[in-house]
Amino acid sequence: MTEHQTVRTERHGDVALIVIDHPPVNAMSVAVRRELAAAIAWVGHEPGVRAAVLACDGRTFVAGADIREFDAPPEQPHLGDVCTALDDCPRPIVAAVHGTALGGGFELALSCNARVLAPDARVGLPETKLGLIPGAGGTQRLPRLAGALTALELIASGRQLSADEAMKLGVVDEIATDLRAAATALARRLADAGHRPRVRDRAVPAVDRTALDTVAAAIRAKARGSLAQGAAVEAIGWALDMPFDEACALERARSRELRVGPQSRALRHLFHAERMANRLPATEQNLHGWAVRQIGVVGGGTMGSGIAVALAEAGFKVTLIEASPEAVHAAEARVAAVWERQAKSGRLTHAGHRERLGRVTYTNDMAALADCDLVIEAIVEDVAAKQAVFRQLSGIVRRDCVLASNTSYIDIDLMADVVDAPERVLGLHFFSPAHVMRLLEVVRAPRTSGEVAATALAVAKRLGKTAVLCRSGEGFIGNRLLMRWRQVCDFALEDGALPHEVDAAMEAYGFAMGYFAVADLAGLDIAWAVRKRLAAARDPHARYVKIADWLCELGRFGQKTGAGYYRHDAGKRLPDPEVTALIERASAEKAIPRQPAAAEIIQQRIHAAMVNEAARALSEGIAHRPSDVDVVLASGYGYPAWRGGPMHEADIIGIPEMLHRVEAMHAAYGAGWEPAPLLREMAAAGKRFADLNF
Ligand code: COA
């Protein structure tokens, strides 16, 4: 045994055990790096030790470099030095991986002489998600094991591999339930054989350079302005063309350069923001949620069936309710189709497929929900219809069954009003498709209890969703902001742009898709219904664009009807002269002289509209902190994550300049576009949005 704080060593006969114990996730802080380097040196010279196992205590193997140290100058030894020490150790060292070996953790494992994984362990290099590339040889060692193409795909996407997948790709040597015993046995076998295989000594398997170039081009295009993916492409090139040490030196330099750059800072901001967004207030943090096993979903349309899929995939038992036997049948087909596709593409095993199918039952009998712990309503966006469902549920389920609405706009309190025990009502706003999209707005109404919120957050965690707690109010956080930037896009049409030009401006900014393409995909009818519902409350002096209403009146509801802002032909989006004519008519009716649209102005106004509306939502307590807004936009609305979200970006631009932009927008758009009082106060007080995060 040695004196230790984060890394200890033990002797088990002729095999040493090095254990990293640095809660919560064994991140490679400078203390861990120092002590691990010392432990490796000890293994190398300790008399009687012939081999070693590198393992971790706690919930996971090393989850990466310590992100909290990224803002400070790097201290020695660097992670790359520790990996080199593993390479150079004269005695074989085997990694015993449980939990997730991510980033620097996986790089450590790749630097060991062999890797044994627990059956549920996962490995990956997620650095690009934090705006950088691995800096301790990961981009050089992984292609030597998995091949350049696979390594590139894994590094550029940051995707994790299951133990089975890692085994298939030749990245690990064994999967074992009795992890440390298996790793010890393997370490001993290597010592017996006098074998110390090093990944660095292997050649990168030959690769078809044309295929690699094609994949690289696709990765760069998909990155939409994010720099890390391009750097990953370069690093894989170094692995193919350069000696190991030279390539590692370049990799380390590039990784460091990215780490101090604005994109990595922005992505780190989002990493921390995500972990704050689902926290209950300090006074409620000790509250426990209620146990949830059986969940009901009312409504089996696109949203309801997607929610059922997400729930079943997380292991919940689900009862899906539809109104009629025909609708029940259609919902079942919708759910089944998702898993059918996954099974066909090999992403779902036969047994897994059967298991998921078995978790969902379908019926038109609401009484079947009597035993549910949570029921999620996902019917049409109509207050009266939703209230009818909640009223009925209140008479069927237990008093401690949480009742949630998946409404995307409607005040949750209106549903709470009609049930017995209103403190158990809240909003769970999923995004479509619900089994794919990460974001979940967890919406508290004034009476929602802390326990009920805690229950919902625990379900969200099990679903693997990025949950953002917010308060109830028209459109919550995301759709409230969307209503604003949608108007900016509409105004741009009347002022002279066409839908594809606005969309191109947004994509150039880094959005996954432009607003009009998304609207066509989602369907124009829901927003139309919302506009009709809110028509009476609309400020008669505020500028109103009729183009979307005209499209809906023509039955152009978007992609599902083959036409919306675009014409949709065989999966292609095409500008449509009929729409151009409508847009020109809208401009002419208001006598607006159409001017060519400058992409930069469109981008700035969309951003300013988001920030101004978010400032209002913050003042009203709908959003708790600016960073929550960033999480919502980046994880649910395609806002380029490498920009850190609109509020982070506003801080970079500067609040006085943001105020100036909002004032200019007010001058251009008129009533309803006044700067938010909070923005004025912040500009006067020299504050940034980051100062309001807690
Ligand atoms: N460095 C420093 N702290 C880290 C960390 C890292 N690499 N990874 C996680 N943490 C912290 C989190 O900030 C959180 O701290 P908090 O409790 O003070 O908020 C805590 O560890 C637990 O993380 P959390 O994400 O809430 O737990 P989880 O069990 O849901 O997930 C991981 C665990 C490891 C899968 C997840 O944290 C993760 O993906 N981490 C990032 C891994 C990564 O990107 N590594 C490469 C770095 S270059």
Image (tube, grey):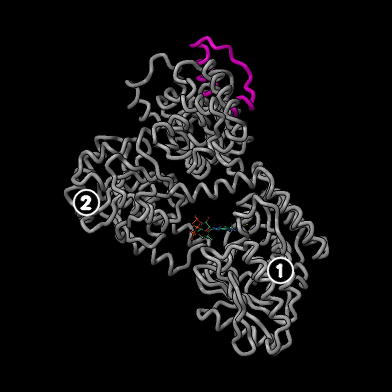
Name the quarter where the N terminus is drawn.
Answer: bottom right
Q: CA distance from mark 2 to mark 1?
A: 59 Å
The quarter of the picture where residue 11 lies is: bottom right
Mark 1 close to ligand 1, CB under 8 Å: no
In the structure shown, which secondary structural element does the residue marked by tag 2 occupy?
A: helix
Residue 73 percent location from the top left of the image: 70, 52
The quarter of the picture where residue 661 lies is: top right
Residue 179 percent location from the top left of the image: 54, 79
466 relative to 38 in the view: left or right: left
Identity, as a three-letter code, of the amino acid under mark 1: Cys
Above/below status of 371 relative to 453:
below
Q: What secondary structure predominates along the stretch shown in magenta?
A: helix
Residue at the spot x=57%, y=33% of the render? 650
Decide: few, some or many residues near mark 1? Use Cα within 10 Å; few <14, some 14-19, many ≥20.
Answer: many
As drawn, the label of residue 366 is: 2
The residue that mark 1 highlights is 83
Above/below status of 562 relative to 146:
above
Counting residues from the start of the chain, the first of labels 2 and 1 encountered is 1
Residue 412 lies in the magenta-colored region: no
Residue 213 percent location from the top left of the image: 74, 53
Closer-to-camera residue (670/515) = 670
Identity, as a three-letter code, of the amino acid under mark 2: Met
Does residue 61 appear in the picture of this structure? yes
Per the rendered image, the range of residues in magenta is: 579-604
Farthest front residue in view: 3
Residue 508 percent location from the top left of the image: 64, 35
